[in-house]
Image (cartoon, helix red, strand yellow):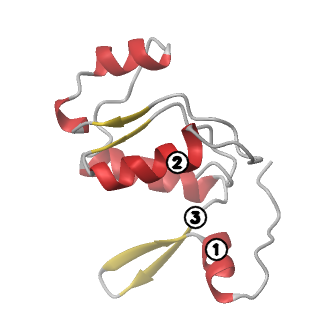
Amino acid sequence: MIRSGLRCLAAIDIDPVAIATLRANLVERQDSDLPIVAHALDRDLRKFKPDQLAALIGTNRVDAKIAERQAASRYLKALVGIGVLREQTFGKEKLFVHPKLMSLLTRDSNTFIAYR
């Protein structure tokens, strides 16, 4: 996410192993070109109140409906609109493909052009 040009203000996951990995890679690391993520929380986002999250990351607005279908669809379409994802239809299903990630997974090189 960060390498793709998005800014990460907090990482929240219900899985303690995922949070331990996030902390090791993005919070408590020494040598990395990635920006530090200030908050990695082992919490259930569905039970974390929006005002608590807003106060934690220092903002006035948090989209608390990120897990709802319509919000997810809106975010995916916005990512298609700015060229991060590519939408593909297979029968009745729509898939959202991240071309740069697919390239990283299928090539020997781990380089790509950063988003601007």
- Label 3 crowding class (10 Å Cα cut-off): few <14, some 14-19, many 20+? some
* Residue at the spot of label 2: 24
> Which of the two residues, 63 or 108, is positioned nearer the viewer here?
108
Q: Three-letter amino acid code at disc 1?
A: Pro
Q: Three-letter amino acid code at disc 2?
A: Ala
Q: Position of residue 24 (x, y in %)?
A: 52, 48
Q: Secondary structure at mark 2?
A: helix
Q: Is residue 114 left or right of residue 81?
A: right
- Label 2 crowding class (10 Å Cα cut-off): few <14, some 14-19, many 20+? few
Q: Three-letter amino acid code at disc 3?
A: Leu
Quarter-of-image position of residue 53: top left
Q: Is residue 6 left or right of residue 57?
A: right
Q: Is residue 37 left or right of residue 91?
A: right
Instruction: Measure the C-alpha gap from mark 1 to mark 2.
Output: 27 Å
* Residue at the spot of label 3: 85
Q: Secondary structure at mark 1?
A: helix
Q: Are marks 3 and 1 in contact (CB under 8 Å)?
A: yes
Q: Position of residue 22 (x, y in %)?
A: 48, 48
Please tell me which of labels 3 and 1 falls first in the chain. 3
Quarter-of-image position of residue 49: top left
* Residue at the spot of label 1: 99
The residue that appears at 63% across and 59% down in the rendered structure is 84
In this rendering, is residue 4 above or below 41? Answer: below
Q: Secondary structure at mark 3?
A: loop
